[in-house]
Amino acid sequence: MNPDLILVGGGLANTLIAWRLRAAQPRLKVLLLERDRTLGGNHTWCFHGTDVTPEQGRWLEPFVVRSWDRHRIIFPRRDRWLDGSYHAITAEALHAGATKALGDAVRTGVAVQTITPDSVTLADGQTIHAPAVIDGRGDPGGRELDVRFQKFLGHLLELDTPHGLDAPLLMDATVAQEDGFRFIYTLPFDERTVLVEDTRYSDTPGLDRDAMREAIGAYGRERDWRIAGIIREEEGALPVVLGGDLDGYWSQGPGVPRSGVRAGLFHYTTGYSLPEAVRLADDLAGVDTWRSDALYRRIRARSFRLWRAGRYFRLLNRMLYLGCEPAERYRVLQHFYRLPAPLVNRFYAGQPTWSDRLRILSGRPPIPVGRALASLFGGPRSGVARLSGGNP
């Protein structure tokens, strides 16, 4: 095979690019390389219907395993249902759908040694040449971005009896506030199968796995769930960006085009990458000249547009992480969820209007005003070496 495009890394972003190009440019020869035996790792990605356009939602349908028409959030002083579609994609569905459709264009169990703008050398010494290469292997490392984390550990549980949930509970923040803003996330796939994640907006990416596993078990016992077994465990640490040097972040490496987290294409407050991965795949579907130099400029420009548009989100992140004590962070989100559902949807889609931005900051501040203002103009910087993780 003499590919026109090599996609290195079979995570969400590159897999969606390959999938979209198969439909939009069926004559284009694409090769997708993944180190592990399956695409997508061991993750569950969810998105609100308003995160993508109706057309994008249609081409994502083969990967969606369950959809709901509402969800719930619970805080000490707020318990609310929000209407609107919500959808789940699993790594199993992503792998099955993509490998069936793409066939020989997908190669798993392949370790990559080096990448250049026009070649990929594998660990066995084989070099594959192509006019265009995209690197989607997660963050390149370095300390250019000032980052905190939304981190999680989750269990997909099989129960002996029904759990009684008919819709996702996206945030149950009535649990003890440990290691930052903490909540339990529950996603019911059927009446006896539920994903439960212990999630924290934390200053560090490390996971106390044993404690989080115990917390998930305790959460089930408190609800009288009879747990028959754990189908799988998943974990991640999603980047929450407070500031930094995007140009320095992009300057690492030999000028190879990027995708996903490696390209800085994710929601700066939630760390979620699916909407930006979908938008990048749609954008690349319209490319007519496949060369790495042109792709590098195109994707880098997209990343910088998101950076400029994301200044407001970085401001909010500084208030959340630097403007109050970790155990008090939940008050910021509790205050946010007083807002109308359409505004909440636009926020999570990364597309708040100017009036939305003003309204989010209106009302009685949930944290001390002086400290909130101080967080906008100073505070410690915490660069990190790895940003990669799943997308709950």
Image (cartoon, grey):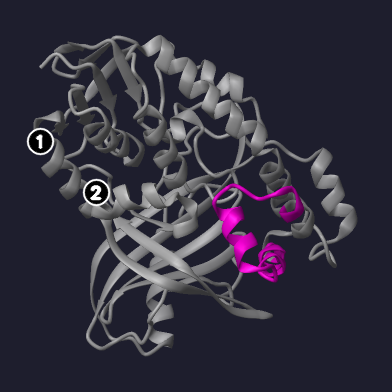
Percent of width and height locating residue 302: 53, 27
- The mark nearer the N terminus, 1 or 2, is 2
Residue 20 seen in this snapshot: yes
The residue located at (85%, 53%) in the rendering is 371
Q: What type is the residue that disc 2 sits on? A: Leu
Kindly identify which residue carries mark 1: 103
Which quadrant, please, contains the N terminus?
Answer: top left
Q: Nearer the viewer, residue 169 or 235?
A: 169
Q: Nearer the viewer, residue 107 or 379?
A: 107
Q: Nearer the viewer, residue 204 or 60?
A: 60
Q: What type is the residue that disc 1 sits on? A: Gly
Q: Please check the rendered image and state whether residue 22 is part of the magenta-colored stretch, yes or no.
A: no
Kindly identify which residue carries mark 2: 94
Magenta residues, as a range?
Answer: 328-356
Q: Is residue 114 above or below residue 351?
A: above
Q: Please check the rendered image and state whether residue 355 is part of the magenta-colored stretch, yes or no.
A: yes
Percent of width and height locating residue 131: 28, 10
Count of picture labels: 2
